[in-house]
Image: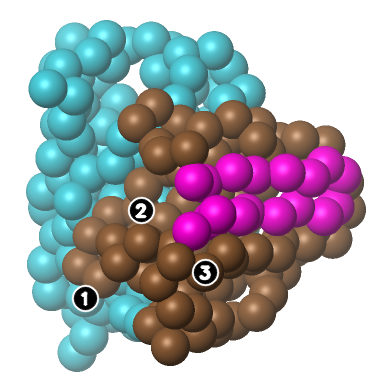
Amino acid sequence: EVQLVESGGGLVKPGGSLRLSCAASGFTFSSYTMTWVRQAPGKGLEWVSSISSKSIYIFYADSVKGRFTISRDNAKNSLYVQMNSLRAEDTAVYYCARDYSSSWGNQAFDIWGQGTVVTVSS
Amino acid sequence: EIVMTQSPATLSVSPGERVTLSCRASQSVSSILAWYQQKPGQAPRLLIYGASTRATGIPARFSGSGSGTEFTLTISSLQSEDFAVYYCQQYNNWPLTFGGGTKVEIK
């Protein structure tokens, strides 16, 4: 079964750090661009960051640039995001997602994890 | 940044009705547009990519059309399981951007 499972969410104080992980199974992880998407409580979807299959291309939303770092370990079938200098507005459910095609340039997402909740509050 | 605008914000519909949702891009995204369905407490589900191609396992009552800046998602006959929030997303340019969503609720 094709699956993504996020972990690492929790409660953190403003200015703090958190590292989210996404474990992939059931597909050739190393062939796909992977992405983090977040959703603040009661709000819509917001793209956060994407990383190409070999980590050559990396993109960030302006809202997280300089604070978040996306990475992957293809040997471990895992995607990560290191989140530093967290703010209240980073509070959200964070989803990892897979491109629908292994070809570059197809950043629509056919496989999503269940999400992990990040709460930034004092 | 390409801004995606969805309308209406909320649509009240009866089961069996035909539903048309709109998505407008602030500049052309060609046909590089996706539609998602999201139910409460669940992750989004990909319905349409490439503006008009149904994703695997998506029922034929869902169809997408449009190109450039104007796009439409049509549900030919709304089923009870279709009440949800629908989002469009462009992936033609970075940053990737989503529309604000249209909530389809029971009338």
Residue at mark 3: B17
The numbered mark at residue B44 is 2
Q: State the CA–CA distance, disc 3 to disc 2.
A: 23 Å
Quadrant of the snapshot with the N terminus of chain B: bottom right
Q: Nearer the viewer, residue A23 or A17?
A: A23
Q: Secondary structure at mark 2?
A: loop
B40 lies above or below A95:
below
Indicate the colour of chain A.
cyan
Of discs 2 and 1, which sits in the foreground?
2
Parent chain of label 2: B
Please give the residue where the numbered disc 1 appears in the rendered image: A119
Q: Which residues are magenta?
A: B61-77
Left or right, A121 with reference to A59 = left
Dot 3 lies on which element?
A: loop
Marks 2 and 1 on same chain:
no
Mark 2 and mark 1 residues within 8 Å of each other at the beta carbon: no
Residue under the point 59% across and 44% down: B63
Q: CA distance from mark 2 to mark 1?
A: 21 Å
Dot placed on the residue nearer the N-terminal end, 3 or 2: 3
**Visible in this render: residue A80?**
yes
Q: Chain of mark 3?
A: B
Which chain gets the brown colouring? B
Q: Nearer the viewer, residue A96 or A84?
A: A96
Residue B2 x/y as whole percent:
77, 56
The location of residue A22, given as percent across then percent down, is 19, 38
Q: Amino acid at mark 1?
A: Thr
Q: Are labels 3 and 1 assigned to the same chain?
A: no
Looking at the picture, tell me which residue is in the foreground, B103 or A39.
Answer: B103
Measuring from the top left, give residue A42's x and y in whole percent.
36, 82
Specify the subunit that label 1 lies on.
Answer: A
